[in-house]
Amino acid sequence: MVAADDDAPNYARRLGIQKDQVVQELGWDEDTDDDIRVDIEEACGADLLDEDADEVIDVVLLWWRDGDGDLVDTLMDAITPLADDGVIWVVTPKTGKPGHVQPAEIAESAPTAGLMQTSSANLGGWIASRLVQPKSKAAGRR
């Protein structure tokens, strides 16, 4: 017999979240998926930090919707506390959902903010785009 939890999506695994990583959440609103949030907290073993955190961040979970403002500015702010090998996941509503963001907006905003898009992950009603700092830029920040 398989436990019900075995059938639950493992969002944290899809995002590469590991124990003891520091995860900051930006852009929370009433529409964010609590299942994703709880799974990440269980995986990293701590609460998600908000925008006022002053720690070095391993992973930024950025909930982003059409109309939320300037993605480049938000990404540049998110980079500031990010560890050199840190990751930003831009989580947007899937196509057809309210607030859907065109993939081109992320693809165009990332390099302007000094990031590279490397992959994406399916998170139920959301899609996440993984952004990282180019190795040469991260090395120069040490």
Image (spheres, helix red, strand yellow):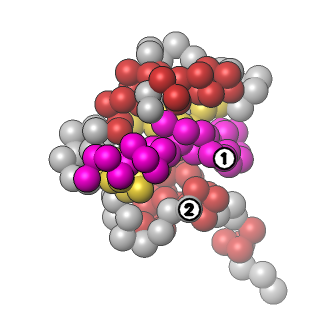
> Compared with residue 75, is residue 46 higher up or lower down, i.e. above or below?
below
Q: Is residue 124 magenta?
A: yes
> Compared with residue 74, is residue 38 higher up or lower down, i.e. above or below?
below
Q: Which residues are magenta?
A: 115-142
**Which comes sooner in the sequence, label 1 or label 2?**
2
The N terminus appears in which quarter of the rendering? bottom right
**Residue depicted at x 55% and y 39%:** 116
User: Considering the numbered disc 2 on the image, is that residue within a helix, a strand or a loop?
Assistant: loop
All told, the count of numbered labels is: 2
**Residue depicted at x 32% and y 31%:** 77
Mark number, residue 16: 2
Query: Which amino acid does the dot numbered 1 rest on?
Result: Ser
Look at mark 1 in the image and give the residue it sits on.
119
Tell me the crowding category of disc 1: few under 14, some 14 to 19, or many 20 or more residues within 10 angstroms, Cα based: few
Q: Residue furthest left?
A: 54
Disc 1 to disc 2, how far (Cα)? Answer: 12 Å
Whether residue 117 is visible to the viewer of this picture, yes or no, is: yes
Please tell me which residue lies in front, 100 or 111: 111
**Residue depicted at x 28% and y 39%:** 80
**Residue depicted at x 28% and y 46%:** 141
Q: Residue furthest bottom?
A: 1
The x and y percentages for residue 21 are: 38, 64
Query: Which amino acid does the dot numbered 2 rest on?
Result: Gly
Q: Is residue 138 magenta?
A: yes
Please tell me which residue lies in front, 54 or 136: 136
The x and y percentages for residue 108 are: 59, 22
User: Marks 1 and 2: CB-CB under 8 Å?
Assistant: no
Please tell me which residue lies in front, 72 or 101: 72
Tell me the crowding category of disc 2: few under 14, some 14 to 19, or many 20 or more residues within 10 angstroms, Cα based: few
The x and y percentages for residue 47 are: 34, 58
